Structures are given as C-alpha cells and as structure tokens.
Image: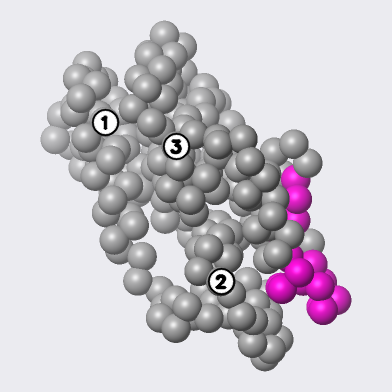
Amino acid sequence: MNILIVEDDQQLAEQLVASLNENGHQTVHVSDGEAGEQQATQMAYDVMIVDRMLPKQDGLTMISNLRQAGMKTPVLILSALGQVDDRVTGLRAGGDDYLSKPYAFSELLARVEILGRRAESQSTDTTVTVADLSLDRIGHSAERAGQKITLQPREYRLLEYLMRNEGRLVTRTMLLEHVWDLHFDPQTNVIDVHISRLRAKIDKDFDTALLQTVRGRGYRLAQPDDVSE
C-alpha cells in the first residue's frame, strides 16, 4: 500500500517509515498538518497515518478539511490523548481508527492493513467518470464522448486505477503494486508500453488529452484545468 505519514516527532516518523517499508509498503512523510493536507491532495494514498497534535494545523482539522473536500482515504489517528472522549472526538472528525501512544508496531501494522482491505472491499461504484471518459466496472468496458473503447485486461486495470485517482499523481511504484501486483521494479518498460497504448486509445482521437505524464514522477489522469500540484 501507499501510505502517507503525518507526524512531527522525527524519531517516531523515521521508525514508522523504516518499519512500514520493511513490510512491503510505500511511504511518504511530512511533519505538519498544512503539508499533510497539501500532500494528501497531490498524490493518491491507500491509507493515511495522522498524528493528532501537529504544528501549523492540528491533525483533526486536517482530516476534517479533507473529508469536507470529499476525500475518502482511510485515516488512522495517532495520539497521546487516549481517553474515550478523545477517541470519540477523533472519529467524529473523520478518522476511521484511533491508536493511542505508546503503541506496538505490530498493532499499528494490523490496523493499517485492515483499513486498506476495508476500503478496497467497500469500493462499490459501478461507473467511474472523468470528463467525457467513463468506465463500466461491471462490463469492464470504457467509452469517451459516446465512442466505445476496447481495452485489454491490463489496460482496463491501469485505466481504472488512474481514474479512481483522478487529478492525483500516481507513481510508477504505485502502478506496479496496484496494477501488476509487484512490490519491486523488474527494470522493464512494461509501464511505458501500456501507458502508450492506453493514451492512443483514450486521447489520440479527441481534442483534450486526459492522460498526462509528470516527468520523472509518474502519471496523472485529469482535465488540464483540474490538476493539483
């Protein structure tokens, strides 16, 4: 999974990053609430781990702002405040789970992985739409501006993942993990080949290109005037 960690305790953050990476996850760390909110809107994450007490903007405000903006990414709140009222406040602010400090990493890992699986299983939308491009998750088919687009199975998975993360940067590592089920880079051009084929199908015959390459970083599917940087 791709995990965003928002934690101002540098030592604790370094431990989290190292341990989660060792368990096969990809992590990004920022140390304050404003940076966390910005990062969450720029890139796709499967789970966010957010400390409650953060500089610049506290964790609950950050989570509440993201929820109001429509973001559904699961959030695990970390906090030294562990009373019942504290946990209830955190959950009502938009957190999906709450873990009091100090904690055992094995418990944190289990909670994070449960949140990731739960989010995936609850994804029930049958149609995904970006601009005039739509994807039918039941029929595994796509069309743009009323024109049917024929997709191979891997192209379908690639397009679905990009569309579900509309407007956000999707890295090559994320594509390898979510589309090819690989947790390492096989050092091939497999992603480039599939992106090229997909771009030819969804953009070539249309006035507006939706599939964008972010040089040196990854890819993004969005309308040109709807890009978060």
Give the residue furthest to the bottom: 146
Counting residues from the start of the chain, the first of labels 3 and 1 encountered is 1
Q: How crowded is mark 2: few (under 14 residues within 10 Å), some or many (20 or more)?
A: few
Q: Distance between the residues labelled 3 and 1?
A: 17 Å
Give the amino acid at mark 3.
His
Determine which residue is flagged by label 1. Answer: 109
Alpha-carbon neighbours of circle 1 within 10 Å: few (<14), some, or many (≥20)?
A: some
Q: Residue 133: x, y in percent?
A: 65, 77
Image point (53%, 63%), residue name: 154
Up-down relation of residue 173 to residue 10 (above or below): below
Q: Do the residues labelled 3 and 1 touch (CB within 8 Å)?
A: no
**At 38% from the left edge and 14% from the top edge, which residue is drawn?**
15
- Report if the CB atoms under discs 3 and 2 are less than 8 Å apart: no
Residue 99, relative to residue 8: is it above or below? Answer: below
Q: Is residue 171 magenta?
A: no
Residue 222 x, y percent position in the rendering: 69, 62
Q: Is the C terminus in the top left, top right, bottom left or bottom right quadrant?
A: top right
Residue 152's disc number: 2
Q: What residue type is labelled 2?
A: Gln
* Residue at figure coordinates x 34%, y 57% from the top left: 120
Question: What SS does tag 3 mark?
Answer: loop
Disc 1 residue type (three-letter): Leu
Residue 76, position as x, y percentages in the image: 32, 38
Q: Which residue is drawn at 58% across and 31% down?
A: 35
Q: Distance between the residues labelled 1 and 2?
A: 35 Å
Query: Residue 40 versus residue 59: which sits nearer the camera?
Result: 40
207 drawn magenta: yes
Q: Residues within 10 Å of mark 3 (few under 14, many from 20)?
A: some
Give left or right: position of 149 versus 76.
right
163 vs 16, left or right, is: right
* Rendered position, 67 above or below 176: below
